[in-house]
Every structure is written in structure tokens, then in C-alpha cells.
Amino acid sequence: MSIIVVGSTAFDDIETPKGKRDRIIGGSCIYFSLAACFRSNPRIVSVVGKDFSKNFFKELNKKGIDTSGLLVKDGKTFSWGGKYKSISEDPETKFTNLNVFENFLPIIPTSYKLKNKIVFLANIDPDLQNKVLDSLDSKKFIGMDTMNFWINSKRKSLDRAFERINLLTINELELGLITKKKSLEKSLEYIFNRYPIKFLVVKKGSSGSLLATRNSLNWIPCYPFAKMIDPTGAGDSFAGGLFSFLNNVNSFDKKNILLGMIYGSAIASFTIESFGTNKIFNLSKKEIDNRYKLLKKIAKII
Ligand code: AMP
């Protein structure tokens, strides 16, 4: 089974209290796919510039990730710089260079449309997320993420997308930015009163994540023993884990979403243990399953 993921492919400059790395490969759809490839065949829709190594495409392909929709265009690859003052805080964005994303029109290859029921709109310009939504012909389960950069610059476009998705993953700070409410309770009320979103997953960093629906609230913990080096990509890996889990179940109900969140938490706990994609790139299914089992016990879902 496969999942279509639309998102950024990037060169990241990252600084955390544990060190600094320049021009390492990142981007929302890269972290998502690397996390999702253990339980699905993710199909990427994204763009890079001529400065991006084609060898990396081959590495992704070896993991069952389809890159037919990962286009190479004249120009430079999207790049982002982030600095984490403390490992538990959100990063301060140093720069965002959209580069080839400025004129990118996401097109889902016909080969992608055949066999998938899930589409994930990873963090990317909401105009592009909407273009993808416009092009979807049949009923799909649609997940979405976003961040402060787009909330501040393209709110109307985000609202249009929120009207058409099933599940939103968002970090707590960014949820507050959207709703302009100080309390989480009021924020949840705002989202469910305003948009037809059925499932809202609020990421709370090292405090775990919440699954909110119109009439329920559940909490999933983080893996407690992770050695944090670089939090970049944790949110995208979490989403990749969650959606690849859903790719293997028959119904997208609350229980399966909670189990998927535990699986996503297990994978994200590896992502943060190295700079960039290093750790998640070399991960084994067994390592993930061990943390998944432990988290499931802690969360007491089953
Ligand atoms: P996260 O999972 O939230 O830590 O996302 C990390 C990834 O988001 C990094 O690898 C960045 O390249 C990417 N990113 C940062 N800013 C943006 C943006 N404005 N649009 C799309 N992707 C971004």
C-alpha cells in the first residue's frame, strides 16, 4: 500500500545546544517518507534544484520510496536555517529560502493515483496544499501539517485547506497562533467550531501528543529515554509513523489513530537522536518495534 506525501525537500542549517550542521538534507516530506517507509511505500511529490544529489533519490528508492513525483528544476533547492536555544523549545528560524518552490506546481503522477487511500500534506506553502486538494478525484483520508511561517503569511489559504482535510497535526504553539487563544481548551473549541476537521493531533514536544475530537481527548506520551541531539523533523517523522500505521488498518477510527500516534512517537524518538536524517536513515524495524511495544505499555491503550 502507498501514501502520497506532498512537502518540502530541503538543505537545512541546524544549530542546537549539541552542535551545528550546515546544508544537511531535510524537509518535511523527506522526514515523513523515511519514517513511513517501514509500513508503506510513500510516494513523494516535491521539488529540488540542480544542486541536489541524484544519489539520494536512489537511496530513497532502495527503501521503497517512490520519487517519480520528486522533480528536479533549474535553480536552488529550498533551504532553511533553524536554531534551538534549548532542546525543548521550538527553533528560531534564521532563514527560509523558497528557491525552486517559488514557481512549483505540484502534480501527482498518474502512477501514484492508482492504489492509495491516504494523502499527507506535509508542511509546505498552503497554496500548493490547496492545488493538490483540488486535483484529488476520489475519496481519500487526508492529513495535513503546517507551521508559523505559513500561518503568519498565508492564513486565508490555510483556512481553505482546513475545510477539506480529515486530520490536522499541529504543534501546540502553532495551534495558539491559528486560534489566537491562550488556553488549549479554547483553542480546541475554536478549531472544532470553525472547521470540519474530525481529528486534531496536538504535538506537545517532550510532553507527548494529544488526540482531540469533538467529544474526546486522549494523551500519548513520548518515549522517555531518547537522547535528544536535534529535534528537527520530529513532527514530520511522527506523522510518517502515524499515517503509515493507518495505511495498514481497515478503519480510521480513534483507537487506530491512537495506536498510530504511539508508533509515530516511537519513530520520532529516533529522529531526534542525531542531526538531520542520520539516525532514521539507518534504523531497523526491530528497533522501532521495541520502542513501540514499550510505549504501548506506558500509554495503556491495550
Ligand atoms: P519539523 O518536523 O517541524 O521539525 O520540520 C522540519 C523540517 O521542516 C526541516 O527539515 C525544514 O527543511 C522544513 N521546513 C522549515 N520551514 C519550512 C517551510 N516554511 N515550509 C516547508 N518546510 C519547512
Image (tube, helix red, strand yellow):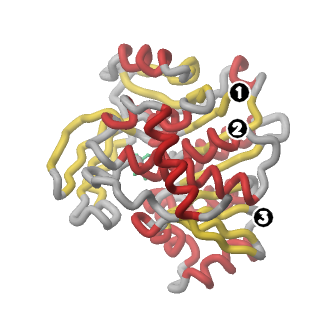
Q: Secondary structure at mark 1?
A: loop
Indicate the amino acid at tag 3: Pro
Q: Reading the chain from its start, which is encountered first: label 1 or label 3?
A: 1
Residue beneath disc 2: 247
Q: Residue at x 70, y 37 (%)?
A: 247
Q: Residue at x 71, y 62 (%)?
A: 199
Q: Secondary structure at mark 3?
A: loop
Indicate the amino acid at tag 2: Asn
Most distant residue in the right direction: 138
Indicate the amino acid at tag 1: Met
User: In 3D space, how far apart are the residues under numbered discs 3 and 2 (Cα atoms)?
Assistant: 22 Å
Residue beneath disc 1: 1
Q: Residue at x 36, y 25 (%)?
A: 75
Q: Is residue 125 visible?
A: no
Crowd band around label 2 with a 10 angstrom C-alpha radius: few (<14), some (14–19), many (20+): many
Please state if 259 lies on the left or on the right of 180 as rendered.
right
